[in-house]
Image (cartoon, rainbow, N blue to C red):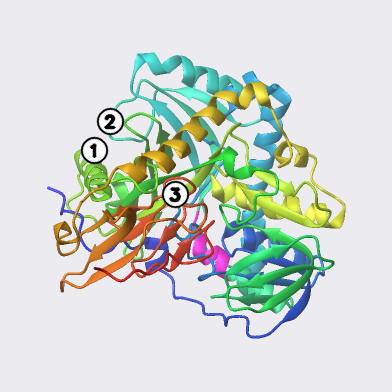
Amino acid sequence: MVTLISGQPKSYWMASTEAAFHPPASEDLSTDVAVVGGGIAGLCTAWELARAGRSVTLLEGGRVAAGVTGHTTAKLTAQHGLIYGPLSESFGAETARQYATAQTEAIEHVAATAAELGVDCELERVPAYAYTHTDEGLAGITAEADAASAAGLDASFTVDTGLPFPVAGAVRVENQAQFHPRRYLLALADDFIARGGRIFEGSRVADIDFEATPHVLRLGSGIEIRALEVVVATHYPIVDRVRLFGRLSPHREAVVAAPIAAEADPGGMYWTAEGNTRSVRTAPLPDGRRLLIVTGEAFTPGSPDVTGRFERLAAWAAERFGLTEVGHHWAAQDNHTTDRLPYIGRLPGTERAYVATGFGGWGMTNGVAAGRLIAGLVAGEPPAWSELFDPARVHPGREAVRFASFQKQVVGHFVGDRIAARRTELDDVGPGEGAVVHVDGESLAVHRGEDGRLRTLSAKCTHLGCIVGFNDAERTWDCPCHGSRFDLDGSVIEGPATAPLERKDPE
């Protein structure tokens, strides 16, 4: 029987690496390029630009490689679920080929860079699988195998996997990789600094003036950074110059991890959309065992009963892999786009501003590709596949259904969550609980500590005013509209919000 999920979530990647501390920005300064965001996209972009000889300053609201990137499952693969079939059908075989090329080049770039820097990031070459349990799912799997192969991947259809349960069929893609993302990125950060780059943590950007020359970035502390060029790599953009907010949808997934015997390693990376998504990989442990990492139970930020999602995922892993305990659990977040392609490139209406977002759950290769693409644009030598990710692209006919779905979801939360409430009275919120309570027509985000003390905040997200929901597993307030997340004291954990939730005094 699996031990019940308990305690605060903790990412294995965070727990297995020491924190690297960088000071906050303490004075106004100027730089060639300012990179906003210290995840994989921001760090890779900053490093590529510094390697090319540019003066680069990286600004991170929290800690580098500790936000979304520190809570990934770290699959470094071009096998992104069932992507090549739909891309080929909607946009043509050449689009699918360019997408595969960008992802494959990213894998090889990480391998080459890790070797160049001499960093042991536990990079392992393994096959990647997308599978189905059902005969009804076979048509999609076989079509994906054909499309992935046509796109240039070493892909094939198979019914044989290393999983301890049968599948009806799977796409197998050879020579993919998995790694320890923080070991890689912290080494990249060190080399970035050695090349003259500057990293400022705890330096959240509140506003960017793109009309000024040079551009002016204003931090929440009041400090101003002037930059000839700006890269916004904040996962969900803190700016919306091309109406990206309406074309992005945030999603979270639960992750559980536990040791298994080395001989029980399924020998690859696995993914299925069935059962509300199940993703499996392993990582090496110092004692010779493997760490089984299982991801799934996809949900919208702000959804109730997140604890139940962790427990269901742990039960699934226990039934299939014989787990008896869960050593680590955490959650991963990403943004999906209306046409399933990331937005990476120049912000329309600007000449020297760039954005990287919408990685659709596959941020490792797309984050590395973003660094290469943006650095190429800055140098005037973009990769051959750069236009594929242009943020200004519009495909009305192909995006209409998903766009309408995204908008319906946002409007539903914006209107409906103002009407509904988890509790009606402050006294109904028990110790350890959090709820949105309507008091005198105002929506309040209320949490009662185990000691009985109330923390009361405005429930309106400071981004665009949607009503946040309580995440009972991670003890956070999450916005269902655009994915902003806040700590119990209202401070920003994750944007696009840049300001904390307003504190309120309980009645």
The secondary structure type at the circle numbered 3 is loop
Type of residue at label 3?
Answer: Cys
Contact? badges 2 and 1 (CB < 8 Å): yes
Closer to us: mark 1 or mark 3?
Answer: 3
Q: Around disc 2, counting alpha carbons within 10 Å, would you say few (fewer than 14), some (14 to 19), or many (20 or more)?
A: few
Closer to us: mark 3 or mark 2?
Answer: 3
The segment highlighted magenta reads 179-186
Q: Residue furthest right?
A: 380
Would you identify the image quadrant in which residue 401 lies? top right
Can residue 321 be seen in this snapshot? yes
* Residue hosting label 2: 165
Can residue 81 be seen in this snapshot? no
**Residue 85, percent from left and from top:** 58, 22
* Residue hosting label 1: 320
Type of residue at label 1?
Answer: Arg
Q: Residue furthest left?
A: 1
The secondary structure type at the circle numbered 2 is loop
Give how far apart the Cα atoms at labels 1 and 3 are: 39 Å
The mark that comes first in sequence, 3 or 2, is 2
Give how far apart the Cα atoms at labels 2 and 1 are: 7 Å
The mark that comes first in sequence, 1 or 3, is 1
* Residue hosting label 3: 466
**Residue 360, percent from left and from top:** 53, 41
- At 68% from the left and 41% from the top, the residue drawn is 102
Does residue 507 appear to the left or right of 388 in the view shown? Answer: left
- At 68% from the left and 85% from the top, the residue drawn is 27
Give how far apart the Cα atoms at labels 3 and 2 are: 43 Å
Looking at the image, is 161 positioned above or below residue 50?
above
In the image, residue 249 lies in the stretch drawn in magenta: no
Looking at the image, is 29 positioned above or below residue 354?
below
